[in-house]
């Protein structure tokens, strides 16, 4: 029987299906983009980003970091939006798996580190369940950049023998059910992610469990970015200081925060610029 010539539309469809069958499965890379400053991206993160066919990124990834992806790579924002539809975690998981099954190199770019309050574990599990290869590249988590910029160590001999990273936000939006008596013990640092809106409740829990209201505290907003802002306060002063915060910020409580410098990034860069004008090295 003579074969009829396929119409143009049919040919295209046949080509796409044939291509899928022959392609080797791709890989999902969970890559930490760091806190914003592209200089804080690791060399490995940069190398992997430059191999991306598709970059799936969240809202905390800075434009400067995104610009380092190949121009031809497809960029998909899955940032949480207040007014428009945002992707559910299950949709993101499915998207990563589907792209990799299509043979693409998928870079899932996340602010900070993928495994610190980044839901990286869920995406890793989804890939494993689908038989898709998933590799992780760590990133500089916001706490490390915030402490470095403020000149306040997270551990410090004699005044900070431990550091704990906690979330300030339960799934209900309320203060989470943490081990407050343990976190209230002196000479340790508590770093609170996503705690701006619950700062009053967090301070009340820590003070109620015995931590002194006079314990030094620091808020760092937009750590490592040009618009970084730092406020040096105390545990008792946290709620009032947090009320001024608009961008992503960390609350850091602990005796070692007494070393923190409050200067804003704008002030620092202004001082550095004036120093350069005078030929002074910063
Ligand atoms: C969903 S968590 C993601 C944390 C991220 N995976 C990390 O390792 O830094 C989002 C929270 O991280 C903190 N955060 C992220 N980037 C920040 C930055 N540049 N400056 C201050 N806080 C930041 C804020 O508390 C923000 O609400």
Image (tube, helix red, strand yellow):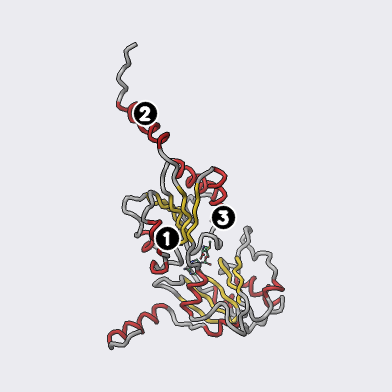
Q: Measure how far apart labels 1 and 3 are at the Cα level.
A: 18 Å
Considering the numbered disc 2 on the image, is that residue within a helix, a strand or a loop?
Answer: helix
Q: Quadrant of the N terminus?
A: top left
Task: Give residue 15's position: percent from left, percent from top.
Answer: 35, 31
Element marked by disc 3:
helix
The answer to which of 215 and 70 lies nearer the viewer is: 70
Residue farthest toward the top in the current orientation of the protein: 1
Q: Which residue is mark 2?
A: 14
Residue at x 42%, y 60% (from the top left corner): 45
Q: Position of residue 37 (x, y in %)?
A: 40, 68
Horizontal and vertical percent for residue 164? 61, 71
User: Residue 276 vs residue 178: left or right?
Assistant: left
Q: CA distance from mark 3 to mark 2?
A: 37 Å
On screen, residue 12 versus residue 228, left or right, reads left
Q: Which mark is residue 121?
A: 3
Residue corresponding to mark 1: 45
- Compared with 281, 112 (above or below) is above
Question: Which of the image's four quarters has the C terminus?
Answer: bottom left
Which mark is first along the chain, 3 or 1?
Answer: 1
**Does the closest atom of ligand 1 sit within 8 Å of the Cβ of label 3?**
no
């Amino acid at each position: 029987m003579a074969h009829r010539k396929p119409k143009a539309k049919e040919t295209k469809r046949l080509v796409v299906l044939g291509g899928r069958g022959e392609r080797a499965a791709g890989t999902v890379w969970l890559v930490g983009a760091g806190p914003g400053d592209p200089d804080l991206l690791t060399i490995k993160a940069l190398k992997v980003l430059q191999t991306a066919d598709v970059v799936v990124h969240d809202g905390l990834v800075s434009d400067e970091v995104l610009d380092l992806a190949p121009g031809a790579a497809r960029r998909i924002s899955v940032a949480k939006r207040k007014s428009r539809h945002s992707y559910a975690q299950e949709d993101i998981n499915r998207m990563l798996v589907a792209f990799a099954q299509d043979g693409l190199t998928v870079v899932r770019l996340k602010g900070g580190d993928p495994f610190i309050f980044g839901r990286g574990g869920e995406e890793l599990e989804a890939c494993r369940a689908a038989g898709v290869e998933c590799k992780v590249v760590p990133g500089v988590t916001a706490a490390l950049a915030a402490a470095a910029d403020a000149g306040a160590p997270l551990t410090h001999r004699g005044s900070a023998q431990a550091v704990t990273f906690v979330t300030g936000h339960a799934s209900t939006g309320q203060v989470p059910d943490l081990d407050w008596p343990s976190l209230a013990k002196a000479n340790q640092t508590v770093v609170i992610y996503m705690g701006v809106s619950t700062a009053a409740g967090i301070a009340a829990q820590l003070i109620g469990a015995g931590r002194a209201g006079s314990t030094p505290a620091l808020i760092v907003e937009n750590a490592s970015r040009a618009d970084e802002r730092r406020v040096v306060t105390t545990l008792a002063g946290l709620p009032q200081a947090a009320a001024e915060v608009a961008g992503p910020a960390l609350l850091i409580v602990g005796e070692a925060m007494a070393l923190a410098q409050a200067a804003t990034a704008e002030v620092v860069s202004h001082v550095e610029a004036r120093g350069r004008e005078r030929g002074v090295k910063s």
